[in-house]
Amino acid sequence: MLADPRRRGVRATAGQLSRLYGPVGLDLGAETPGEIAASIVAEILATASGRRAGRLRDQVTPVHDPIPRLTAAEAAFDDVSDDPRTLTGREIKCQTESR
């Protein structure tokens, strides 16, 4: 990966090199190019969100942060009628099913 830039005289700094690591991807048992791509994207998503990419069934804390609910005052001034924070779970489910 770095050989071609080096042949053209481009040298990476120590700081830039410290940000590279490999092999890349999560151990999903990937064999095909598509599976390898999925493992790489999965690692990128986990790293970007600060997650360890473990099994969800082994997690003891909630998977997602709760959706913030609007206070009555915020809802009164909210002119976007389909803001998901103002909907109940049943309304969200109905909207999702109708799409």
Image: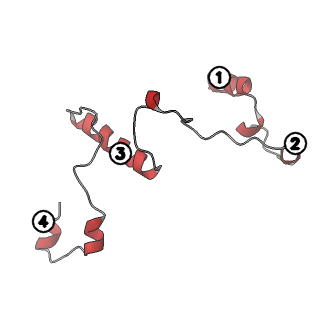
Residue at left 32%, top 38%? 38
In the rendered image, which quarter is residue 18 located in?
Answer: bottom left
The amino acid type of the residue labelled 4 equals Ala
User: In this figure, which residue is indicated by the disc labeled 2?
Assistant: 72
Q: Which mark is residue 50?
A: none
Find out whether the residues at labels 3 and 1 contact each other: C-beta distance under 8 Å: no
29 lies above or below 70: above
Lower sequence index among marks 2 and 4: 4
> Residue under circle 4?
3
Report the residue marked by disc 1. Answer: 98
Residue named by callout 3: 43
Q: Amino acid at mark 1?
A: Ser
Residue at 47% over, 49% down: 49
Element under disc 1:
helix
Residue 31 in the image, given as x and y percentages of width and height:
19, 32
For mark 2, give the secondary structure.
Answer: helix
Precedes in sequence: disc 1 or disc 2: 2
